[in-house]
């Protein structure tokens, strides 16, 4: 390091000497003009300065060459070293969506109509009516249901509890019922499976046979008649159906859970096979949320979408047995209670009360093999960034306001990681946790070495990139993502980007999972299309990369 500094200082000294030399020679011949001949002019003002300047340039060139030679081995090694593999998890997803804009990908994305309505029932603090964006179709279809609810409540609940049901709860149930109806085919398949399980349980031997031997002949005769039915029952089956219901704090959770049980019972899914947990989403995007277990009465605990992904979805993908779960999240802001709670917050003048609902069905490969569900598209989820702490409270302890600038830096770093993974190793991500033979693993490694990357496929494929960014409130994040997109465009890719965080910006559970539901809808709209569909969702210092893989052989 000392030699490099000496050479640099020496070069600067020669440059200074050249300047001083020219100045002194000019001053000398200025006073002695008669001594300036053509030969002396050429020597003192041309040859000697060129020699000095050339020597300076040579030293600089030699110094750069030496530095390049020192860095070359390190650069070669870094090119040979591949980035450590990042775990990617595969699962299958069905979705249904309900927004003011529509119920599926093309309808929602292409809807440019003004859907705002001037509310006659709601007003701001000046007494002026406010603009709202309701889901008109759902409300119209469920009008009779609202009237029926009050009659039903008087039978199922105490009279005072029925009277306490607020308008928001009824609107939320309308959204939930709409999503269940939209997922009728999948729920019917689940109901048929659980019906067979219940029949199997009925035909299992009863311990009372050991006490009353005379009952055995009757039992044997009945089981013989049903032997063919028992033979067709699956050896491995679903034991329970886990349901996660995300609702706003002002809703009546008990009412919604009970109505959900009743509705699923109409499909033939009994209550004893259900495990329903409610998630109370707070109003601030990307902040912590409350989690309630509707069965064990546990105290509230901080709970975030990323923790749901870790605790439920990743565990589901790793399970060797069939696993399936329903995730329902709904929110309706078109009510007086929500308006009172949010009207006086910052930027209240920009509030546009709206509503939304989604239902996501997550299931693993074992469940796909067991059930006849639509599985033309497989999805890969990859976490980018810091690992999730084991202690959930450590995440809740983070103060988003203090870590805001730091979060931006993490997002930038995460985007760089995603870009490198996609350009260098994107397709290898899709098979990280599948059972593959050694030959398949060797083939995958050869594909990477032969640079069979997304860069090679850009001329044949386009990229549909989704994000849960709200452009109106996250301009910096949007600029980072646009830079990320520009780098793919520079590689020759055609990128269609959609930023979906504006659909429900004040609900931290709807924001990422609504984007995921739209990715599922887009992927299943044209499953044979060759373009690459991906979604990037933000979770504090981490991001989730969701990739859709269309394959008719899955």
Image (cartoon, grey):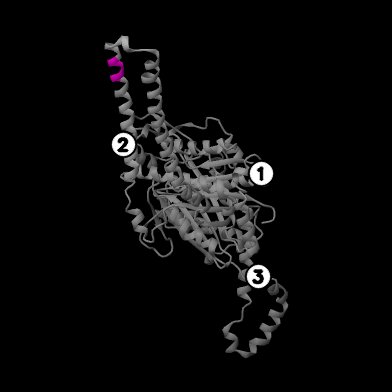
Under tag 3, what secondary structure? loop
Is-magenta flag for residue 27? Answer: yes
Identity of the residue furthest to the top in this view? 34
Is-magenta flag for residue 10? Answer: no
Q: How crowded is mark 3: few (under 14 residues within 10 Å), some or many (20 or more)?
A: few
Under tag 2, what secondary structure? helix
Q: Which residue bears the numbered disc 1? A: 530
Q: Which residue bears the numbered disc 2? A: 9
* Residue lying at 57% horizontally and 67% vertically, measured from the top left: 320
- Residue 378 shows up from this direction: no
Q: With 354 as the anchor, is 347 left or right in this view?
A: left
Q: Which of marks 2 and 1 is in front?
A: 2
Q: What secondary structure is the magenta-colored segment mainly?
A: helix
Q: Find the distance from the CA under tag 2 to the CA under tag 1.
A: 59 Å
Q: Find the distance from the CA under tag 3 to the CA under tag 1.
A: 36 Å
Earlier residue among tags 2 and 3: 2
* Residue lying at 35% horizontally and 37% vertically, measured from the top left: 343
Residue 551 x/y as whole percent: 67, 52
What label does residue 234 carry, if any? 3
What label does residue 177 carry, if any? none
Count the numbered circles shown.
3
Nearer to us in this view, 544 or 251: 544
Q: Nearer the viewer, mark 2 or mark 3?
A: 2
Earlier residue among tags 2 and 1: 2
Assess whether mark 1 and mark 3 are in contact (beta carbons under 8 angstroms): no
* Residue lying at 63% horizontally and 47% vertically, measured from the top left: 524
Q: Give the range drawn in magenta.
A: 23-28
Under tag 1, what secondary structure? loop
Residue 303 x/y as whole percent: 40, 55
């Amino acid at each position: 390091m000392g030699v490099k500094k000496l050479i640099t200082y020496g070069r600067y000294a020669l440059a200074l000497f050249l300047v001083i030399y020219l100045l002194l020679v000019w001053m000398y011949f200025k006073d002695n003009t008669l001594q300036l001949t053509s030969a002396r002019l050429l020597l003192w003002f041309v040859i000697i300065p060129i020699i000095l300047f050339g020597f300076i340039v040579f030293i600089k060139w030699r110094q750069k060459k030496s530095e390049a030679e020192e860095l070359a081995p390190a650069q070669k090694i870094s090119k040979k070293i591949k980035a450590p593999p990042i775990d990617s998890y595969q699962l299958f997803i069905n979705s249904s969506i309900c927004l003011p804009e529509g119920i599926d990908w093309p309808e929602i994305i292409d809807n440019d109509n003004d859907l705002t309505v001037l509310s006659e029932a709601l007003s701001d603090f000046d007494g002026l009516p406010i603009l709202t964006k309701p889901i008109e179709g759902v409300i119209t279809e469920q009008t009779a249901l609202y009237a029926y609810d009050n009659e039903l409540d008087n039978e199922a609940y105490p009279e005072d509890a029925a009277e306490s049901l607020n308008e928001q709860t009824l609107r939320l149930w309308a959204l939930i019922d709409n999503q269940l109806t939209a997922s009728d085919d999948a729920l019917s398949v689940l109901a048929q499976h659980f019906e067979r399980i219940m029949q199997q349980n009925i035909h299992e031997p009863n311990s009372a046979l050991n006490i009353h031997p005379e009952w055995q002949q009757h039992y044997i005769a009945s089981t013989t008649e049903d032997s063919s039915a028992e033979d067709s029952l699956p050896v491995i089956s679903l034991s329970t159906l886990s349901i996660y219901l995300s609702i706003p704090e002002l809703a009546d959770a008990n009412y919604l859970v009970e109505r959900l049980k009743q509705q699923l019972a109409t499909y033939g899914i009994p209550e004893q096979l259900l495990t329903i947990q409610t998630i109370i989403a707070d109003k601030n995007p990307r902040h912590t949320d409350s989690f309630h277990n509707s069965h064990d009465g546990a105290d509230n605990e901080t709970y975030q979408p990323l923790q749901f992904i870790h605790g439920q979805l990743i565990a589901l993908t790793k399970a060797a047995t069939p696993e399936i779960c329903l995730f329902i999240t709904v929110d309706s802001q078109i009510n007086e209670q929500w308006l009172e709670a949010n009207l006086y917050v910052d930027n209240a003048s920009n509030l546009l009360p709206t509503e939304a609902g989604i239902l996501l069905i997550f299931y693993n490969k074992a469940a796909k093999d067991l059930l006849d569900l639509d599985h033309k598209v497989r999805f890969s989820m990859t976490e980018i960034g810091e690992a999730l702490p084991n202690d959930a409270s450590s995440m809740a302890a983070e103060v988003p306001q203090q870590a805001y600038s730091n979060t931006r830096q993490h997002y930038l770093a995460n985007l760089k990681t995603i870009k490198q993974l996609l350009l260098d190793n994107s397709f290898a991500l899709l098979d990280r946790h599948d059972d593959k033979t050694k030959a398949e693993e060797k083939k995958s490694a050869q594909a990477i070495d032969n640079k069979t990357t997304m860069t090679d496929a850009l001329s044949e494929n386009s990229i549909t990139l989704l994000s849960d960014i709200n452009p109106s409130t996250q301009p910096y994040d949007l600029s980072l993502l646009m830079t990320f997109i520009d780098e793919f465009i520079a590689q020759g890719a055609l990128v269609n980007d959609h930023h979906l965080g504006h659909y429900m910006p004040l609900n931290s559970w709807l924001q990422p999972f609504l984007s995921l539901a739209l990715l599922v809808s887009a992927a299943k709209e044209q499953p044979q299309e060759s373009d690459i569909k991906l979604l990037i969702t933000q979770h504090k210092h981490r991001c989730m990369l969701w990739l859709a893989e269309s394959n008719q052989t899955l």
